Image: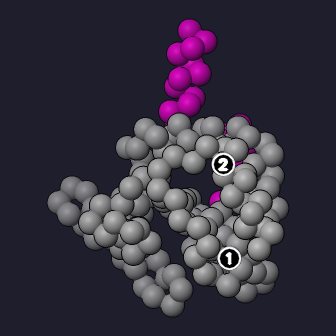
């Protein structure tokens, strides 16, 4: 029974042991004007099992959560269910419906694979909103901490 509860909690979207401060793109624009910080854009989908496992593992790392909350803006972006217009770096991006599903133009614009992005997708920008790191696929907690530490030293 305990294993079943653990598995259930691990797969529930949004469940976390620590709390990362998550911004929307609208919040982020305002925050950047008030205080420029590097930004992490995490692009995922609800159906992606790797995304769910990764999210659980990263959120349980209190040191990582603290590092992100203190030094970065963090945007968690669901690529296939976010339907609202997003303004990013002076451009407008919209949801592209395709029958019963669809994808957001921003996910396509940020991905190197313009036909079908790889999830999860990590985009890390410096304070000037310039790309400093691009990562497709799962990010292990220690690897992410190491990369973020390198970015903070730039």
Residue at 69% x, 58% y is 147
- Label 2 and label 1: CA atoms lie apart by 18 Å
Q: Residues within 10 Å of mark 2 (few under 14, many from 20)?
A: few
Q: Residues within 10 Å of mark 1 (few under 14, many from 20)?
A: some
Which one is nearer the viewer's eye here, 36 or 83? Answer: 36
For residue 24, which quarter of the picture?
Answer: bottom right
Chain part drawn in magenta: 1-24
What's the mark number on residue 23? none
Residue at 79% x, 81% y is 35
- Residue 96 visible at all: yes
What quarter of the picture does the C terminus occupy? bottom right
Q: Which residue is at the far left?
A: 99
Name the residue beneath numbered marker 2.
143
Q: Which residue is at the far bottom?
A: 90
Circle 2 or circle 1, nearest the eye? 2
What quarter of the picture does the N terminus occupy? top right
């Amino acid at each position: 029974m305990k294993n079943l509860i653990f598995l259930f909690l691990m797969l529930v979207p949004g469940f976390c042991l620590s709390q990362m401060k998550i911004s929307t793109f609208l919040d982020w624009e305002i925050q950047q004007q008030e205080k420029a910080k590097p930004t992490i854009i995490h692009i995922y989908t609800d159906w992606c099992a790797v995304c769910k496992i990764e999210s659980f593992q990263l959120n349980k790392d209190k040191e990582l959560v603290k590092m992100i909350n203190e030094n970065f803006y963090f945007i968690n972006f669901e690529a296939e269910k976010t339907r609202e217009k997003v303004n990013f770096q002076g451009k407008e991006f919209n949801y592209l419906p395709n029958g019963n599903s669809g994808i957001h133009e921003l996910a396509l614009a940020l991905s190197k694979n313009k036909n079908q992005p790889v999830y999860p997708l990590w985009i890390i920008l410096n304070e000037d909103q310039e790309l400093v790191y691009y990562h497709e696929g799962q990010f292990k907690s220690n690897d992410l901490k190491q990369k973020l530490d390198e970015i903070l030293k730039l």
